[in-house]
Image (cartoon, rainbow, N blue to C red):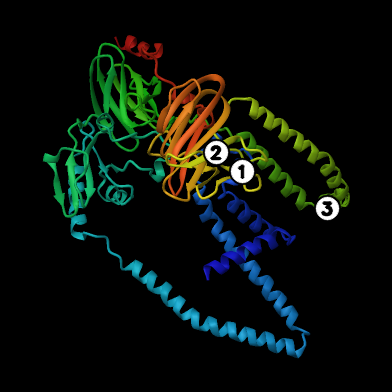
Amino acid sequence: AFAILGYAGYFGIIAGLWSRRASTVFVATTALVLLVGLCDAPYLALDLAPGKGGARLGTERLAQLARPFVAAAGAYTIAIVLRHAIASWVGAPRRHQLIAAAIASVLAMAALRAVPSVWRSASDRAYSETQVVAPDRAGRAELVRWAAARASELRPDAWARAVFETDTHEHFHLTAITGLPTFHLAPQPDLLLRERIENLSPPSLRRFNVRWAIASDRSPTLGDPASEKIIGTFHIREIREWDGQLARIERGTGQLRVLALDSTHVEIDVTASEPVFVVLGTGYYPRWRARHASGVSEPVYAVPSIEGGTLHVVGAWVAPGRTTFTVDGPLPSDHDGRLLAIAALLLALAGIITWSRRRWRLAILRRLARLRCRLPAVISLAIRIGVPLVLVMLFARGCADRGGPMRALELGTGLRPSATVEARLVDGDWETCGYNAITAIFACDQLLVAYDGMASLLNDAPPSWGFNTPAIVASAHRTDVEMRVRVDAELDGTYWMAASDRATVVVSGEASREIDRAIVTYARGPRTIEVRAAVPTSSWQLTMVHEETLVPARPFLAAPPAIAPASVRAIGDRLQ
């Protein structure tokens, strides 16, 4: 039934685009755009990837957004069919009416037989879902009591978190009930693309004050085995590196105490003879700011959470005395859309005022009617001029892209491919794969197929979802197939590479690399890139893209100065 509604929705999209009804055209257009957004082809054909605009686009969510629009388009299809059926019934010959009635009767009887079972199945499934009880109810209740006890022991100078070795979100309920801070390393909805804990290495656990590791139905991989505590199906271990210090002095000498810590601020007291650099064990955000007890602001900086890390925590040069950290400062992007918002507001007000005056409204409608009469001639002229102009622009763009440094490793989707693809059985002779210009697919008979697609193999940090990048996609027809790809391109700068299964990448003038993940910098110049890999019968992917197409400029992550700024030193001078 749902499949029929889906296909009816596809037909409704096509019919709705030509309905000349504003609301119907809107629904059909929105559904079409969302469905097209699920496909790889538009991103590759329109050169939208690789690019910062689509690198973090969660395309899988477009399907959820498209469902109500497709359902509405399906309802529009049903309305069209019913309307035409009713119109055809009136005035139809008696014989045709009898035939239609017989067909309708058969369909109605079939529906009567199917509807009860479908209804019963859906209601039973819904009822079963309501009866599902979380496993180990007693253990969970005991875990809540344990977490509440631990949360009551937290102090500003002895802060702690618990890490759940899972990729699900049930522990958020534990935090809401008990107040014990918990997290897991995989992407979390409220922390996507944010600066947060980068990995579960000992320095990272110490930085973020992780005291407990919790796993279900097994022992945690982290923590001291001797400290393991079992509560029902939950296993809890303590982390040896924990010291409870949310704030630490990383440059300079002195003593530091955390006086207050809650959801609005962190207050510290520094005893030292000169400014010190203090780092907090919490993710950096541009709204963080620090203010000394004297009322003077102290600059806040982004500091790598661990040595060589890519995610950042909060750091600041602070003067001796009390300093309060808060998260209520301005963002660099604040007011970026102010001019557009003002222009949109003025346009809306102008439309409301103009449409409320009958004389002005009629004048606008007459002008629109005259423009509509001239529209066919304008469209014809636009086609004669615009189409050749667009072709010239596309040709120029293609030449520019071809002449510059490679943005992404691709096989090619044009009339002529950009790469040579070969395949063989293990230890056999290489066979050149043919290229189909219509489907843009390389195929070696009985061996494999290869083509350009999209992948999410690259990421700058595990807590966020992967980048959407062009990739070489291949699948073999049997288990003992190797593939070799050769591409001539100009390289310049840093490239990120990743493969779903290990691959060998050879760039002329460079050593061979066995990669699953790699970041490599190349000097500018023409190169021949060769990729070799054993291709599975499922799907194999490899991506290689320029760093500039993924990572936007983030000047607010500038490193802190080596010494305290003059404004901070002046605070200490005044106190002395």
In the rendered image, residue 517, in percent from the top left (x then y), is placed at 41, 33
**Residue with the mark numbered 1:** 435
Classify residue 425 as left or right of residue 104.
left
State the CA–CA distance, disc 1 to disc 2: 9 Å
**Residue with the mark numbered 3:** 365
> Which mark is drawn over residue 538?
none
- The amino acid type, in three-letter code, at marker 1 is Tyr
In the rendered image, residue 293, in percent from the top left (x then y), is placed at 33, 22
Classify residue 129 as left or right of residue 472.
left
The residue lying at 31 percent from left, 52 percent from top is 170
Quick one: 264 or 504, which is closer to the camera? 504
> Which mark is drawn over residue 421?
2
Quick one: 205 or 535, which is closer to the camera? 535
In the rendered image, residue 263, in percent from the top left (x then y), is placed at 33, 38
Quick one: 538 or 520, which is closer to the camera? 538
- The amino acid type, in three-letter code, at marker 2 is Val
In the rendered image, residue 316, in percent from the top left (x then y), is placed at 35, 21
State the CA–CA distance, disc 3 to disc 2: 60 Å
The residue lying at 59 percent from left, 61 percent from top is 70
Q: Are marks 3 and 2 in contact (CB under 8 Å)?
A: no
Asked if one can make out residue 430 in the rendered structure from this viewpoint, the answer is yes
Q: Are marks 1 and 3 in contact (CB under 8 Å)?
A: no
Q: Are marks 1 and 2 in contact (CB under 8 Å)?
A: yes
